[in-house]
């Protein structure tokens, strides 16, 4: 196994993915991920000097949609599959503390 | 006290005025709607759903980018910005990364009467997230409620270069940007309702190098932008003067306490792992589309402001107040069509009309008075048919009832007394009743004359022509000597 991703980086990836991994799991993923990623290293052998990055393989123009609103499929139907619902809201565990609550909206 | 240079850059999100969301047909009219009623599999990010780009989003963003003198990129690509938060059902936000709609533009505006220019780094489009609520009797303790009605509403993000040099300039720049998007019909620019949101980067430095950048969020009005940034300038200045470090961080503005607060516990969160969204093909922006939109751009606020200054000989300040609201500027110009006295119309609009609007708590578009009605009233003042004082109270009634000036005047039995004979009779009566004031005036007390004019006004219930009253008084009094 070649180390392409360090244990440190792996821990950070787990952190931003909101995953809690045990030491044992970390070690397992460390080996697996490095095995997989090191295979991709092979791609570095290609000479890509004059080639611009490709984001998609299709050259066709995408379809556009018109700006016409239709009734949503909201209401009970969408809430049906949710584990917890209250007053039309999806209920989720609180992820912010009280002090932050005022500031958490409009965060995009 | 050492001298520091302040450097500010703005990131402004504008909600685009589309009827449908960015990638689905759900309505964007979410304010006041029941939670999770304007949603579908696409904006909820359900498996198997596919986004399709609403063409109007591109048009509106192009309009904004062109008005900001941006270079338009021939191809747009959407990226996924990945982060986990309950208001983002897909686990990523569809945004743009290295290929936005427009780059390298500029924005001109006035600040303290001086024309400024700030470069625009980029204009890109992205979708909005949902809303979280943390309080409500129906919510079990330790939980939050998610409303996805806002998910997928289109936004344009405008990013300026860090070239603004004071909180005041940042506010003025933002006001101009808001005006531009309103004039363009791209956004309604309402900061209180969140259709215009502003974040700022601010740093202080004592050398030519930029200082440590602090991001300030959660400023919900022009005033709070100014206050929050002023607070940051002082906070950072103190730290620098005490030789303490400034941390690169995000701080939230607390409107009530008037302070910025560090957003803790966010370390590691700024790793968005952008990659091209495989669900959305790159879209091209054709030359004809750019030309068409360019040719349809309306007169923009700065052009209009400068035209008002040259065409109507208004000061920059006067012109600015009028153009800040497109409807007011239109009202002004429509009034001029019937009564071409720009300065007088400007004065009446910015004082009396504004006062009435404020008292009624309405916009000009909701007012019952029309430009033609105002012109009619001002013509009467100009011809001295009624005094300014009376016109003000007539205007008040016009606002309240929607009646026209002539109706109000006839009903109240008002007429302007500019008949010299009639006025002279009243003046003589007043002189007779106030011997002391007459004596005072004759012994050189100028103030007594004002008192006598006031008495004539009282007698006539404000209907006397003040200039004429004064000259008649002086004439009659000098014959008393």
Image (spheres, rainbow, N blue to C red):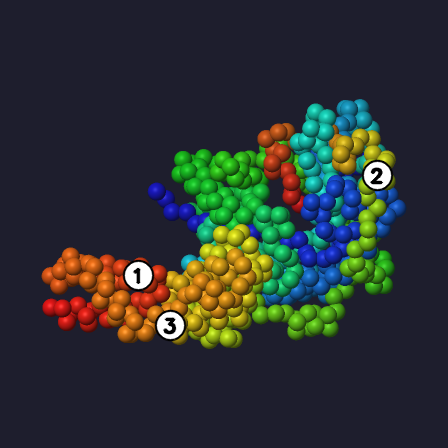
Q: In which quarter of the image is the C terminus of chain B?
A: bottom left
User: In 3D space, how far apart are the residues under numbered discs 3 and 1 (Cα atoms)?
Assistant: 19 Å
Q: Say which residue label 3 marks.
A: B384
Q: Can residue B223 be seen in this view?
A: yes
Residue at 26% across, 62% down: B453
Q: Nearer the viewer, residue B129 or B443?
A: B443
- Assign a secondary structure to mark 1: helix
Chain ID, mark 1: B
Neighbours of disc 2 within 10 Å: few (<14), some (14-19), many (20+): few
Image quadrant where residue B102 sits: bottom right
Pointer 1 residue:
B459
Q: Nearer the viewer, residue B326 or B11?
A: B326
Marks 2, 3: nearer the viewer: 3
The answer to which quarter of the image holds residue B381 is bottom left
Find the distance from the CA under tag 2 to the CA under tag 1.
Answer: 72 Å
- Pick whichever of labels 3 and 1 is earlier in the sequence: 3
């Amino acid at each position: 196994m070649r180390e392409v991703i360090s244990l440190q980086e792996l821990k950070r990836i787990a952190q931003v993915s909101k995953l809690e991994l045990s030491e044992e799991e970390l070690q397992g993923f460390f080996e697996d991920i490095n095995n997989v990623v090191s295979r991709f290293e092979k791609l570095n052998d290609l000479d890509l000097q004059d080639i611009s990055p490709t984001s998609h393989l299709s050259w066709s123009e995408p379809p556009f949609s018109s700006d016409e609103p239709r009734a949503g499929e909201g209401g009970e139907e969408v809430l049906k599959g949710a584990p917890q619902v209250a007053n039309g809201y999806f209920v989720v565990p609180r992820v912010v503390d009280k002090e932050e609550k005022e500031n958490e909206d409009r965060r995009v | 006290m050492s001298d520091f240079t302040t450097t500010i850059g703005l990131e402004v999100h504008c909600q685009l005025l589309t009827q449908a969301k960015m990638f689905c047909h759900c309505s964007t009219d979410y304010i006041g709607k029941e939670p999770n009623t304007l949603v579908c599999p696409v904006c909820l990010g359900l498996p198997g759903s596919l986004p399709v780009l609403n063409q109007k989003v591109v048009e509106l963003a192009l309009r904004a980018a062109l008005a900001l003198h941006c270079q338009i990129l021939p191809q747009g690509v959407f990226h996924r910005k990945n982060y986990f938060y309950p208001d983002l059902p897909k686990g990523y936000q569809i945004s743009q990364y290295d290929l936005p709609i427009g780059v390298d533009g500029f924005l001109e505006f006035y600040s303290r009467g001086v024309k400024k220019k700030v470069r625009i780094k980029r204009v890109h489009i992205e979708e909005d997230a949902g809303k979280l609520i943390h309080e409500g009797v129906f919510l079990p303790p330790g939980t939050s409620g998610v409303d996805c009605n806002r998910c997928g509403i289109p936004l344009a993000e405008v990013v300026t270069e860090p070239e603004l040099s004071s909180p005041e300039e940042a506010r003025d720049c933002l006001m101009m940007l808001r005006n531009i998007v309103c004039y363009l019909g791209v956004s309604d620019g309402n900061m209180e309702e969140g259709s215009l949101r502003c974040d700022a980067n601010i740093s202080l430095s004592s050398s030519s190098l930029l200082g440590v950048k602090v991001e300030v969020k959660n400023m919900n009005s022009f005033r709070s932008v100014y206050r929050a940034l002023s607070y940051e300038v002082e906070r950072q200045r103190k730290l620098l003067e005490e030789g303490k470090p400034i941390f690169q961080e995000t701080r939230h503005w607390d409107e009530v306490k008037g302070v910025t607060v560090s957003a803790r516990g966010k370390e590691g969160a700024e790793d968005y792992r952008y990659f091209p969204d495989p669900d959305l093909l790159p879209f091209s922006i054709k030359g004809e589309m750019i030309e068409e939109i360019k040719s349809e751009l309306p007169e923009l606020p700065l052009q209009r402001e400068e035209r008002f200054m040259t065409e109507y000989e208004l000061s920059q300040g006067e012109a600015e107040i009028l153009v800040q609201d497109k409807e007011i500027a239109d009202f002004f110009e429509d009034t001029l069509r019937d009564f071409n006295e720009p300065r007088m119309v400007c004065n009446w609009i910015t004082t009396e009309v504004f006062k009435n609007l404020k008292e009624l708590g309405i916009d000009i578009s909701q007012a019952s008075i029309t430009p033609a009605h105002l012109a009619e009233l001002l013509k009467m003042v100009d011809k001295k048919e009624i005094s300014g004082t009376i016109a003000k109270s007539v205007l008040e009634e016009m606002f309240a009832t929607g009646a026209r000036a002539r109706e109000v005047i006839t009903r109240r039995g008002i007429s302007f007394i500019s008949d010299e004979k009639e006025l002279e009779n009243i003046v003589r009566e007043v002189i007779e009743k106030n011997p002391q004031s007459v004596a005072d005036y004759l012994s050189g007390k100028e103030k007594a004359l004002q008192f006598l004019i006031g008495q004539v006004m009282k007698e006539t219930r404000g209907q006397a022509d003040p200039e004429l009253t004064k000259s008649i008084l002086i004439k009659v009094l000098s014959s008393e000597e």
